[in-house]
Amino acid sequence: MSNLFPESEYYDEQFKGISFSKESLDSVKFYDCTFTNCDFSETLFTDCKFSGCQFTDCNLNLIKVLDCHFSQLSFQACKVTGVNWTEAIWPKLSMPGTFTFEECALNHSTFIGLGLQQCVFRSCLAKDVDFREADLTKADLSSTDFSESVFGDTNLTNADFSHATNYQIDPGSNRITKAIFMLPEAVSLLYCMDIQLKEE
């Protein structure tokens, strides 16, 4: 157990201004806790559980989430770059809305093959993020910058890309039925179709 987190379970706790960078935390459970202005960068979380927790203005860059469990998490104005979310344990029956990211930096992260139905990635910077084979059905992806991010065999059914920018999505290798796109950015969907676009 760490000195900052000596208990094995925490309920409705508020953590503010904690510096826990490059540390390790093993088998600790957090329920409905809030974390504000905390630094967890490069921390190794192993077999931890976060349920109904909220992170605001936190640094979570390069965290490791080995065998961790997540449900109904909210991130507001956080740095969450370089995280491989596939290292966590994901239930076979995914729960909609596992993650809400608003105004966060998510660059260089990996969500390959994860069930992210109804998750929120709103007003984020998501450069070089890997969404291949993920299920983003009914996800809110609005106003996010997807520069260099990868979509392949991704389920984007009913996903909302309103005001999103710099996405490169091949309609032939992703499911985009009833997804919402806006002009002029939506023109990028045509670039993969081996056609010529001609302006008057």
Image (spheres, rainbow, N blue to C red):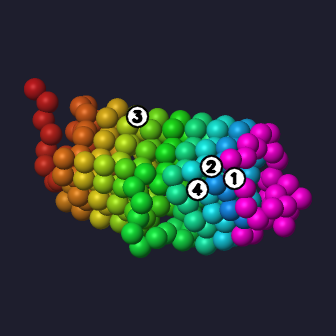
Report the amino acid beneath label 3.
Answer: Ser
Cβ–Cβ under 8 Å for marks 4 and 2 = yes
Please state if 15 lies on the left or on the right of 112 as rendered: right
Residue 32's disc is: 2
Q: Main secondary structure of the magenta part?
A: loop
Does the segment drawn in magenta span residue 136?
A: no
Q: Is the residue 39 above or below the residue 183 in the image?
A: below
Q: Which residue is mark 1?
A: 11
Q: Nearer the viewer, residue 185 or 79?
A: 79
Measuring from the top left, give residue 192's x and y in whole percent. 22, 53
Q: Which residue is mark 3?
A: 143
Query: Which quadrant is the C terminus positioned in?
Result: top left
**N-term mark: 4 or 2:** 2
Cβ–Cβ under 8 Å for marks 1 and 2 = yes
- Between circles 4 and 1, the one closer to the viewer is 1
Query: Which quadrant is the N terminus positioned in?
Result: bottom right
Residue drawn 85% across the image and 55% down it = 4
Residue 150 at least partly seen: no
Residue 55 at least partly seen: yes
Measuring from the top left, give residue 104's x and y in whole percent. 56, 40
Q: Secondary structure at mark 3?
A: loop
Measuring from the top left, give residue 190's x and y in whole percent. 19, 46
**N-term mark: 4 or 3:** 4
Residue stretch in magenta? 1-27
Q: Which residue is mark 4?
A: 51
Q: CA distance from mark 1 to mark 2?
A: 6 Å
Report the amino acid beneath label 2.
Answer: Asp
